[in-house]
């Protein structure tokens, strides 16, 4: 079954095949979480949600979730067994462990790792003409925000593999808000995540409305904005400053392993992004008189 799913991606290289296997693992993990009742308490968001349910044309690495209500005592552990059971039912061996917290944080984390032998077998069956030298086993980080900023809405999205089931997800305007918060305020010293810029371009080209209410809540909650509300002009100003400060060579280098067509980045430049952000859909406006 895994082999047939992988063939649907039509991988052209070993790298393509490994990215496709990661996505298959992500979908199986979502199935395990759904069977265990996880989506009664949490919703799916982030780049992988955008990739799986909205066709974002790049691969993504991690699984990010937010609780529907604040719960500092939440633990992933009861739900991890459901993920293992789902993989076992498909004849796949994985290891999955909840990360031990060394300090108090608002994020509960776990790591899902595929059995290397299984991955090697599948790729060799799909691409027998290649001399396959396996990189380290695929590893997927699972994170849950246990004390999330609220002001978001959810919807049920249908997934067909490994069986038909629904996943509770952030709506697109709230996904956009989460991505904008990450792009503007990500705490990475000396590093840049070009995937944030790729995703922002996708949202703008699709005219997805940006939920300023949720963006303001996130920025205030993270301590990056002085009030729980943020205006359109503030967003544009912050983006302009970010565009002028970032290295576009670094942005492109980060995105390159996750996309098939590098030509889509040929237009990327400070001038392009300055013009692009002025096309953000701000139709979900904030009323500061409420």
Image (cartoon, rainbow, N blue to C red):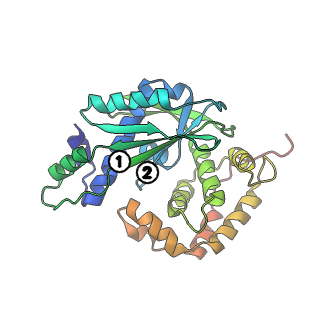
On screen, residue 98 versus residue 96, left or right, reads right
Determine which of the numbered discs, if any, sits on residue 61 in the image.
2
Figure quadrant of residue 86: top left
Tell me if residue 91 comes above or below residue 240 in the rendering.
above
Question: In the image, residue 18 lies at what x, y percent?
Answer: 30, 53
Question: In the image, residue 46 lies at what x, y percent?
Answer: 53, 47
The N terminus, quarter of image:
top left
Question: In the image, residue 137 lies at what x, y percent?
Answer: 32, 50
Image marks 1 and 2: residues in contact by CB distance under 8 Å? yes
On screen, residue 287 versus residue 160, left or right, reads right
Most foreground residue, 247 or 177? 247
Q: Residue at x 64, y 41 (%)?
A: 106
Q: Residue at x 56, y 27 (%)?
A: 41
Q: Which residue is drawn at 50% across and 28% down?
A: 38
Tell me if residue 180 comes above or below residue 288 in the rendering.
below
Most foreground residue, 256 or 51? 256
Residue, disc 1: 22
Extreme residue in the right direction: 289
Most foreground residue, 140 or 1? 140
Which structural element holds mark 2?
Answer: loop
Q: How far apart are marks 1 and 2 (CA)?
A: 7 Å
The C terminus, quarter of image:
top right
Tell me if residue 33 comes above or below residue 20 in the rendering.
above
Give the number of marks. Answer: 2
């Amino acid at each position: 079954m895994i082999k047939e799913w992988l063939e649907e991606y039509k991988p052209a290289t070993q790298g393509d095949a490994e990215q496709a296997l990661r996505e298959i693992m992500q979908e199986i993990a979502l199935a395990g979480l759904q069977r265990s009742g996880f989506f009664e308490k949490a919703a799916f968001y982030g780049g992988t949600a955008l990739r799986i349910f909205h066709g974002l044309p790049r691969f993504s690495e991690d699984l990010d979730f937010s609780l529907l209500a604040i719960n500092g005592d939440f633990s992933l552990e009861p739900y991890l067994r459901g993920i293992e059971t789902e993989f076992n039912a498909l004849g796949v061996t994985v290891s999955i462990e909840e990360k031990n917290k060394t300090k108090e944080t608002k994020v509960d984390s776990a790591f899902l790792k595929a059995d290397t032998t299984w991955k090697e077998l599948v790729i060799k069956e799909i691409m027998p003409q290649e001399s396959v030298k396996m990189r380290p086993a695929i590893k997927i980080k699972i994170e849950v925000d246990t004390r999330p900023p609220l002001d978001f809405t959810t919807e049920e999205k249908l997934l067909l593999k490994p069986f038909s089931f629904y996943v509770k997800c952030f709506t697109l305007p709230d996904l956009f808000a989460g991505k904008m918060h990450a792009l503007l305020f990500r705490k990475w010293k000396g590093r840049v995540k070009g995937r944030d810029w790729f995703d922002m371009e996708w949202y703008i080209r699709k005219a997805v409305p940006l939920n300023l209410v949720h963006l303001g809540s996130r920025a205030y909650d993270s301590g990056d904005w002085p009030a729980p509300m943020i205006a359109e002009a503030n967003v544009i100003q912050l983006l302009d400053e970010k565009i002028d400060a970032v290295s576009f060579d670094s942005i492109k280098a980060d995105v390159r392993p996750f996309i098939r067509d590098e030509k889509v980045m040929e237009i990327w430049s400070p001038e392009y992004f300055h013009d692009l952000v002025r096309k953000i859909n701000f139709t979900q406006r904030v009323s500061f008189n409420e």
